[in-house]
Amino acid sequence: MYGVVEIKGHQYRVQEGDVIDVQKLDAEVGSTVEFDEVLFIGGDSPKVGAPTVAGAKVTAEVVRQARARKVIVFKRKPGAYRSKNGHRQHYTGLKITSIKA
C-alpha cells in the first residue's frame, strides 16, 4: 500500500519503510510524527480524497535533522559589482512506519 501525503505544502508519494527528506520539522530525533493530510491511498482499493481522505494517517519516525549541501550563488554586473553567497537548507529525514486508511 502507498499513499500521497502533504507535508509543509509539498506532496510526497510514500510507502512503509521509505526514508524521505522534508523541510525542517520541529521534532526530536527518534520521535514519532503523524500526518493527517493524506490526499490518496493506493493499493487493492484506492481511495481519493476530496481534498483529503477521511480518517487516514501516515506515521513516521524522525531519523535525522541535517543541512543539505552548500549551494553557491554568484551575482555579477558590469562594473565592479560582484557577490558570492552560500546557502544550506535545513531538512528533516523521516522513515515512514505505517499508513492507515
Image: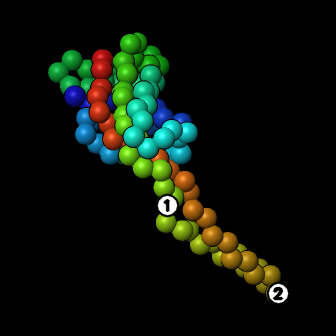
**Does residue 66 lie above or below 14 as drawn?**
below
Residue at 52% across, 45% down: 23
- Indicate which disc residue 36 carries: none
| Quadrant of the rendered image containing residue 85 | bottom right
Q: CA distance from mark 1 to mark 2?
A: 33 Å
Q: Is residue 75 left or right of residue 43?
A: right
| Quadrant of the rendered image containing residue 13 | top left
Label whose residue precedes the other's in the sequence (1 or 2): 1
Find residue 51 and report its horizontal and vertical position in percent. 47, 19
Q: Nearer the viewer, residue 27 or 83?
A: 27
Q: What residue would you read off at disc 1?
A: 68
Q: Amino acid at mark 2?
A: Gly
Find residue 48 and report its horizontal and vertical position in percent. 35, 19
Q: Is residue 59 left or right of residue 71?
A: left
> How many neighbours does mark 1 have within 10 angstroms: few (below 14), some (14-19), or many (20 or more)?
few
Outermost residue toward the bottom in this view:
80
- Indicate which disc residue 79 carries: 2
* Secondary structure category for the residue under label 1: loop
Residue at 42% across, 27% down: 34
